[in-house]
Image (spheres, rainbow, N blue to C red):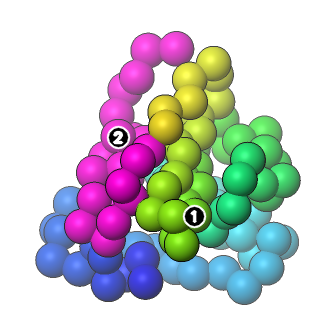
Amino acid sequence: MVGEALAGRPDLTVVGETSGEVDLLLSAERADVVILGAGSGLPCAAERLLDEYPRLGVIAIDVEAARGRLYRLGPHVTQLDRVTPAELATAIRLATADIPI
């Protein structure tokens, strides 16, 4: 799904998908943003990612509700409404923007 949503956007590259939390933590070292499926709240994996990689942006998406949240280390959380495949690229760009915290 993520690869399809970002197809045709030359400034964004999907570097991989993982099948478990350990793979996720090891693979995140080479990423700027990690996208997780999520219901409500911040998944435990996202907390670990932010602890390990403070510069990382984590986007947790509830696909059924088409909503998500962008998490970055620091006191900044941005509510993402209407997360559609077309708007996923915008959310990723927001995650990598230099937001003062």
Q: Which of 37 and 6 lies nearest the eye of the viewer?
A: 37
- Segment tinted magenta in the rendering: 80-101
Which quarter of the figure is the N terminus placed in? bottom left
- Is residue 97 found inside the magenta-colored segment of the image? yes
Mark 2, Cα crowd under 10 Å, few <14 / some 14-19 / many 20+, is some
Q: Does residue 58 lie above or below 27 as drawn?
A: above
Label disc, if present, on residue 5 of the rendered structure: none
- Is residue 59 found inside the magenta-colored segment of the image? no
Residue 65 visible, this orientation: yes
Q: Position of residue 76 (x, y in %)?
A: 56, 23
The number of callouts visible is 2
| Residue at 52 percent of width and 64 percent of height | 65
Q: Is residue 15 left or right of residue 12?
A: right
How far apart are labels 2 and 1 at the CA level?
A: 18 Å
Q: Amino acid at mark 1?
A: Asp
Residue annotated with mark 1: 62
Q: Residue lying furthest front in this view?
A: 65
Element type at marker 1? strand
Residue annotated with mark 2: 94
Q: Which of 88 and 47 lies nearest the eye of the viewer?
A: 88
First in sequence: mark 2 or mark 1?
Answer: 1
Q: Which of 34 and 30 lies nearest the eye of the viewer?
A: 34
Q: Amino acid at mark 2?
A: Leu
Q: Position of residue 52 (x, y in %)?
A: 76, 45
